[in-house]
Amino acid sequence: LTALPKMMLFVVCLLCLALVGRVAAYSGVDVSQRTYSSNFNCMVNNGYNFAIIRVYQSNGHPDPNAAASINDAWAGGMSYVDGYIFPCYSCGNPAQQMDDAINNLAYNNIKHVKRGELQANGTSPTVGVSYGMIWLDVEGTQYWSSNAQSNIDFLQGMVDQGNRRGVTMGIYSSNSQWSPIMGNTAQFSNLPLWYPHYDNNPSFNDWYSFGGWSRPNIKQYAGDVGFCSAGVDLNYY
């Protein structure tokens, strides 16, 4: 090859990589209030294709809106739907909290199915409506013990029970929250990480390692946004 074709090939390769990056990027929302199929459908029409629904509240009870919002996320056209737990440390019994979250969804015919096993609309004849993961929200020092090891033990109890129940889990936290609450432990770095940084930039360009994680899986880049007549946070992966 001559020098010119080589340069052209290099440029084409860069363009291909850029296109692959765009194809591989996904936009989504997370919600902590009742959200309807019309809201989700509007989001889908604006390029958002995954939703993460709160399924357990910091008051120590399953979210009463979780099942309905998960159903409506699928009905609105979302491609992936997960749930998240806001643990209640002061309530104790982390295993029971995990059970309560899972059982509440199961009672409403919503069961865990790994993403690769989902049909396009998130349902199957034998499972019904589903969720792909449960994320464990670690934030707010006021919600946790002042002792990092006690917090680690609590979170491990929740993870252990999730493993026994066969659900796929991840951690939601940031360095500013993980360090004071969990002492920057790397004990949970085998789990996927969803981190918040409100820079309105849907990319991982701001990422730096903490808690043993070398890379993130999802970024929450904007919080408390009014979007499609719903209150949401905006996410990217």
Image: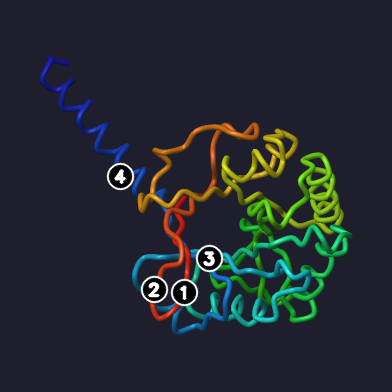
> Which residue has dot 1 on it?
231
Horizontal placement of 115 versus 77: left or right? right
Horizontal placement of 228 versus 6: left or right? right
Q: Earlier in the sequence, mark 4 or mark 2?
A: 4
Q: Earlier in the sequence, mark 3 or mark 1?
A: 3
Asked whether residue 159 appears in the rendered view, the answer is yes
Q: Is residue 77 above or below residue 171?
A: below
Q: Nearer the viewer, mark 3 or mark 1?
A: 1
Whole-number angstrom distance, CA of label 4 to CA of label 2: 27 Å
Q: Which is nearer the eye, 224 or 230?
A: 224
**Where residue 19 is drawn, which disc sits there?**
4
> Which residue has dot 2 on it?
227
For label 1, the crowd category at 10 Å Cα-Cα, with few meaning under 14, some 14 to 19 and many 20 or more, is: some
Amino acid at circle 4: Leu
Q: Earlier in the sequence, mark 1 or mark 4?
A: 4
Question: The residue tagged with tag 4: helix, strand or loop?
Answer: helix
List x then y, in percent, for residue 136: 69, 55
Amino acid at circle 3: Asp
**Where residue 30 is drawn, which disc sits there?**
3
Q: Earlier in the sequence, mark 3 or mark 4?
A: 4
Q: Nearer the viewer, mark 3 or mark 4?
A: 3
| Callouts 1 and 4 close, C-beta under 8 Å | no
Whole-number angstrom distance, CA of label 3 to CA of label 2: 11 Å
Horizontal placement of 123 versus 79: left or right? right
**Where residue 86 is drawn, which disc sits there?**
none
| Callouts 1 and 2 close, C-beta under 8 Å | yes
Q: Which is nearer the eye, 24 or 182?
A: 182
Question: The residue tagged with tag 1: helix, strand or loop?
Answer: strand
Whole-number angstrom distance, CA of label 1 to CA of label 2: 6 Å
List x then y, in percent, for residue 59: 74, 70
List x then y, in percent, for residue 198: 43, 52
| Callouts 4 and 2 close, C-beta under 8 Å | no
